[in-house]
Image (tube, rainbow, N blue to C red):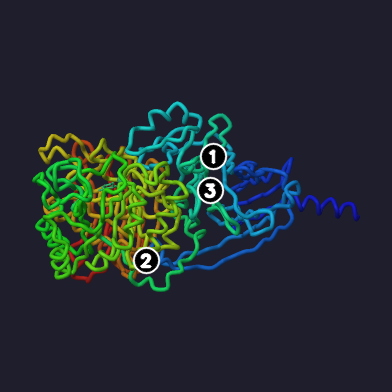
Amino acid sequence: MLLLFVFANSLWAHAQEIFSPNKNLSLKFEIKENGVPTYQLTYKKKPVIQPSSLGLELKDMPSFMDGFSITNTAQSSVDNSWNPVMGEEKTIRNNYNELVVTLAQAKNNNRYIRIRFRLFNDGLGFRYEFPKQNDLNYFVIKEERTEFQLAGNHKIFWIPGDYDTNEYAYTTSKISEIPSLMQKATIEINSQWPIKELAVQTPSMMKSADGLYINIHEAALINYPAMYLEVDPVTNKLRSHLAPDAVGNKGYMQTDTQTPWRTIVVSDKATEILASKLILNLNEPTSYKDVSWIKPIKFIGIWWEYFVAGKSTWAYGVENNVKLTDDFSKLTTNGKHGATTERAKEYIDFASKNGFDAILIEGWNIGWEDWINNWKEEVFDYVTAYPDFDVKAVHEYAASKGVKIMMHHETSGSATNYERRLDRAFQFMKDNGYNSVKTGYVGKIIPRGEHHDGQWMVDHYIHVAKRAADYKIMVDSHEAVRPTGLNRTFPNWIAQESARGTEFESMGGLSPDHTTILPFTRLMGGPMDFTPGIFQTDLSYYGTGSTQRVNTTLVKQLAYYVTMYSPLQMAADIPGNYERFPDAFQFIKDVAVDWDNSYILEAEPGDYITIARKAKAKNEWFVGGITDENVRTANITFDYLPAGKKYIATIYADAKDANWNKNPQKYTVTKVVVTSKSVLKQYIAPGGGVAISIKEGTTSDMKGLNKL
Ligand code: NOJ
Ligand code: CA
């Protein structure tokens, strides 16, 4: 009896298993041979992650790779809910079972770590924790060695692993095909730094042959470098790889501390991947006391014309060898400066007439003549306007029309210069009535040798978000490290770019399936400032010699306001183009950007997405559906509408002969009456979409309308 007990007890000490609240997922933790920590994950009895080892290599210190034994385990459960400041859902349920294992290394004076696993119904999160202890204080991470042994040669939607950019086009292939496709996938982009080892970025989206959708990313990336996945194309094993700093080290740590969460979202339904709130749940609640100043923003901007028309520029003068200390009032103008007081007033008029919250004005400040590629320390000062842009006059005019101006801080990658000037820049914004800023990090980073995704820059972006909060300023960062749900903790960091967005439609174009992949990859981490809303898709229209085209129908651009979640949404086209299509523009004017509920109706990465959402605190619903290059029939249900009531749905649809390539601007706008029982089989053109707004109406409003 006693022997049996001892045996069982020692087994218990080596293996631990927990289940998700609904029992679909199981997580098993074990100490394998040589004291190597190992975990495995199954979903409805199918292997998601086969036994995979956990550990870290340290610099000039014994590693955290092996020689471990379990000294303690603890299990607990949590089921509560919380309300994000802005989001896809008004209330988010946080429900998981937790296992914490304490692992000591006898060979290293019983130095110990903890691994914390949280198993939700939609996946697993786990992190390494380093408590305060005698034999561990400061340490430097040489590499994190977290393994993800996949159960097969899955289909994967990937972009090349790169320390400095996420602005690549996606490749869809088998894992085994990544090596032969890597070179082609690594197209040339500004300030890229492809990883030498075979690696892909996260969020990494995969689909197994037996129909499991698996998404690997991270949550709460704070004071640590971003993680990429090294790929073994023979064994289907993925392994963590961290962004290095200028001297090749990875993370600088001091106990008590921890790594970000490693996340594996899994389901047999693609729609559940998009609905997952696991990454947000693994981030800390905000500590901001007052969040009343954080608001959704729908905006237009002096922006797209820089990319397409060639008729205006960020720079005031001729691209030249200038210095910040030069007298810019003496600069000879190139005659094409976009951000003039006059132009700003025209945009303000348009914004106010059409109900936009704000206008973004890029190119308002000195420095653009000489900003790219020179790795200059000081390109912008963030407070001096060009001679033809009157900050005070523009703000007074905007205020009189009830419109906000969105600040633009392009840093040219010189984060040091930006940090030195940050307080003055934010004070300038306060003094002049700005409450939001679009930041940008185009170019190689200064401090020289640092990367966009390294620990130093990760801390920089957070520093900017926190400092901005001190001034009640909202931040929309471009070219920053991809998001990991930190908008929960820092809710004024309201959106990010960190992916290939609309700007690339003017530089070679996005493939028609790109935006059916983004929500499964980049947007898993947080809202994206994708800058949708381009109506004039054929850029030869401008007569500037451009033969580029935006690879969508006009209606697909409308659908993006629903399929591409962000509480900050731009109507990116030039106002004149909206005036040409007033009936389609109506959808952009109406669509909400903050939501009570979201319903992922249909989805398949790389193929299609259909989503319905209920506007925040309003009885209005919006539906967006998109397809790739193939025609499709979307199955749109309305069962999220309150039962027994009639609503008016305005359906913006591709015309039968519409096509992203040859006939993008043909569409129909139809009003019908819908109820919770209605079902719509909606034709979507190749590269097209559908957008629907649903509102309450009186009987007389509904008179003469067909019922769906
Ligand atoms: C790249 C950003 O993505 C784009 O939106 C911006 O206009 C330029 N940088 C200039 O800052
Ligand atoms: Ca960009």
Which amino acid is tagged 2?
A: Ala
Q: Using residue 352 as the reference point, say whether residue 274 is left or right of it.
A: right
Disc 2 versus disc 1: nearer the observer: 2
Question: Crowdedness of circle 2 by 10 Å Cα count: few (<14), some, many (20+)?
Answer: many
Question: Crowdedness of circle 3 by 10 Å Cα count: few (<14), some, many (20+)?
Answer: many
* Residue 537: image location, x then y, percent: 19, 42
**Which element carries disc 3, helix, strand or loop?**
strand
Q: Is residue 76 above or below residue 501?
A: below
* Figure quadrant of residue 464: bottom left
Residue 210 is tagged as 1
Which amino acid is tagged 3?
A: Gly
Q: Is residue 47 visible?
A: no
N-terminal label among 1 and 3? 1
Proximity of marks 2 and 1: CB atoms separated by less than 8 Å: no
Q: Which residue is mark 3?
A: 251
Which amino acid is tagged 1?
A: Asp
Question: Crowdedness of circle 1 by 10 Å Cα count: few (<14), some, many (20+)?
Answer: few
* Residue 81: image location, x then y, percent: 50, 68
117, 246: nearer the viewer: 246
Q: Residue at x 33, y 52 (%)?
A: 417
Query: Mark 1 to mark 3: distance in Å?
Result: 38 Å
Q: Using residue 644 as the reference point, say whether residue 356 is left or right of it.
A: left
**Which element carries disc 1, helix, strand or loop?**
loop
Disc 3 versus disc 2: nearer the observer: 3
Residue 469 is tagged as 2
Disc 1 versus disc 3: nearer the observer: 3
Is label 1 within 8 A of ligand 2 (CB to nearest ligand atom)?
no
* Residue 677: image location, x then y, percent: 36, 61
Q: Residue at x 36, y 47 (%)?
A: 498
Q: Using residue 245 as the reference point, say whether residue 661 is left or right of it.
A: left
Q: Residue at x 69, y 57 (%)?
A: 134
Query: Mark 3 to mark 2: distance in Å?
Result: 26 Å
